[in-house]
Amino acid sequence: MNQSTDDRPIFMKPGHNAGDLVESGKWKILTEAPGLVEVEAHLPEHLLNPRNQLFGGFTGTYVDMISLYTCRTLYEKGSDFKWSATVNMRIDYFAPVLGPNFRLKGELINDGRSTCLIATHFTDLQGNKLVHAITTLRKNA
């Protein structure tokens, strides 16, 4: 976990193209444990559709970021973990994602030898379900 200048834990330091697009360095980590990540994210203006909702095409970026980070929590720092690659993603939309803030939860469903299956949940701050996704990642790709 990284620290920001105000000593608040952040999701990912700047410098990752997808992370910078969704401004993940500004996300607040609520929970981080092996196989589980929960963050409070914000909705940047440049990701809005004409109805001031998250443009659906960017939803996969959020899903990928949470899935990759959730997979990473399975490994100790300094272990042989190199990276993971997304090999499949399914996204179901229930309601629009609105700003300014919403929650993302990544949860390990299955940890196999070479792949892992991660569920990602988007909820509003009242706990209403907005988006559900399932991602298969190849480990140490």
Image (cartoon, rainbow, N blue to C red):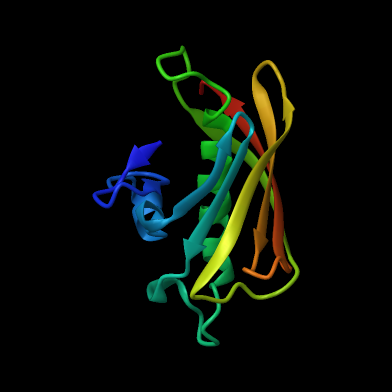
Q: Is residue 47 above or below residue 29?
A: below
Q: Residue reaching furthest top?
A: 80
Residue 136 x %, y %: 67, 36
Q: Is residue 135 above or below residue 122?
A: above
| Horizontal side, residue 110 vs residue 97: left or right | right
Q: Quadrant of residue 82?
A: top left
Residue 104 x %, y %: 59, 55
Q: Is residue 14 above or below residue 138?
A: below
Q: Quadrant of residue 132?
A: bottom right
Question: In front here: 136 or 108?
Answer: 108
Residue 89 x %, y %: 66, 46
Query: From the image, which quarter does the N terminus lie in?
Result: top left
Q: Residue reaching furthest bottom?
A: 51
At 59% across and 33% down in the image, what residue appears? Answer: 33
Q: Is residue 79 above or below residue 39?
A: above
At 58% across and 31% down in the image, what residue appears? Answer: 71
Residue 55 x %, y %: 54, 73
